[in-house]
Structure formats: C-alpha cells, structure tokens
Amino acid sequence: MYVTPEQIQATNKANVEAILAVANAQFAALEKLATLNAGVFRGAFEDSIANTRALLGAKDVQEFVSLQNAFAQPAVEKAIAYSRSVYEVATTTNAELTKVAERRVSEWNENFVSLLDKVSKNAPAGSDVAVAAVKSMLAAANSAYDNFNKVAKQATEIAEANVSAATETVKGLAKPRKAA
C-alpha cells in the first residue's frame, strides 16, 4: 500500500483549509470585538462629558447627588449590554471553531476507515478480527466524542441561562432606591 502524491496534496490542502478557517474565525472575532470596544469607548467618553457638564450645572448638593444616581442606572445597563455582546462574540466564535474541528475529525475518521478497508483487503487471513477491533474502538471513540459534544452544548446552555439570570439580578440591584 503506497501513499500517492495526490493523497499527500489532498491532505495538505485540507490541513491548510482548516488552518485558514480557524484564522478567519479568529480574525472575524477580533474585528467584532474591536468594533464593539471602539463603540463602547466612544459612548463612554461622550457620556462622561455630558455627565460632567450636568454635574457642573448642579445648583446644590442634593441635585448633584440625584444626578449621580441618575447616571448610575444607564451605566450599569451599558456595562451589562457590553458584557452580553462580548459573550455573544465568544460563543459565536466557539461555535465556528467547533464546526471546523468537527469537520476535520469527520474527514480524519473517513480517511482512517478507508485506510482500514484497504489494509484489510491486502491483509493476511485472520486479520479481520484485528481490523474489526480497531473499527470498534474508533466507533466507541466517536460515540464518546459525540457524548462529550452533547454535554458541552448542555453546559453552554446552562451557562447562558446563568448569565441571563445574573444580568437580571444585577439590573435589579442597580435600580436606584428612594431614601426613606
């Protein structure tokens, strides 16, 4: 059994495509984060200027304190929105990278099974048991990998629910309270 130059070329091409897919996903995530950060910093700068002007226009201490309290709620909501946006970018990127990895694992499995089939055709009599054992181990590994992916997806769903619950809790705690 020989490896042909075409097989080597196809493998190299698949590896380069996988690397490029990962690089593209990472670049897209960095681009989204840079855009998000630029918008947040611009907004924070503009808000701080407007808030400073409003505070400088306060006529007494009570107005000054009430203005500060009024500024707190929008700031908390913006921080929550920012963290949610960063989380969304991270989960989207993770999903894209997972798809790339799953494609590569699938291709590897197909190639390995194909190789096993070729080897078993040219193998001496009695080696069928060994080939079947390797195929069984591969099936078990694939099953474990699928189960791991299901657990990881469930953990992600739980984390998303916890983030949402924590967000609502923080929003509730950040609401201004009236003095007694």
Image (tube, rainbow, N blue to C red):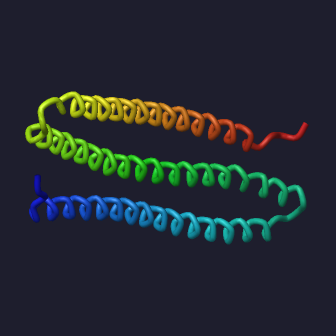
Q: Position of residue 46 (x, y in %)?
A: 61, 69
Q: Position of residue 154 (x, y in %)?
A: 47, 31
Q: 141 or 93: nearer the eye?
A: 141
Image point (81%, 53%), residue name: 66
Image point (34%, 49%), residue name: 101
Q: Position of residue 13 (x, y in %)?
A: 19, 63
Q: Quadrant of residue 75?
A: bottom right
Query: Image check: 66 left or right of 101?
Result: right
| Quarter of the C terminus within the rendering | top right
Image point (9%, 41%), residue name: 122
Query: Image check: 69 left or right of 90?
Result: right
Q: Position of residue 70 (x, y in %)?
A: 74, 52
Q: Quadrant of residue 4?
A: bottom left
Q: 31 or 154: nearer the eye?
A: 154
Q: 178 or 86: nearer the eye?
A: 86
Query: Total label count?
Result: 0
Image point (56%, 70%), residue name: 42
Q: State whether residue 39 is above or below residue 83.
A: below
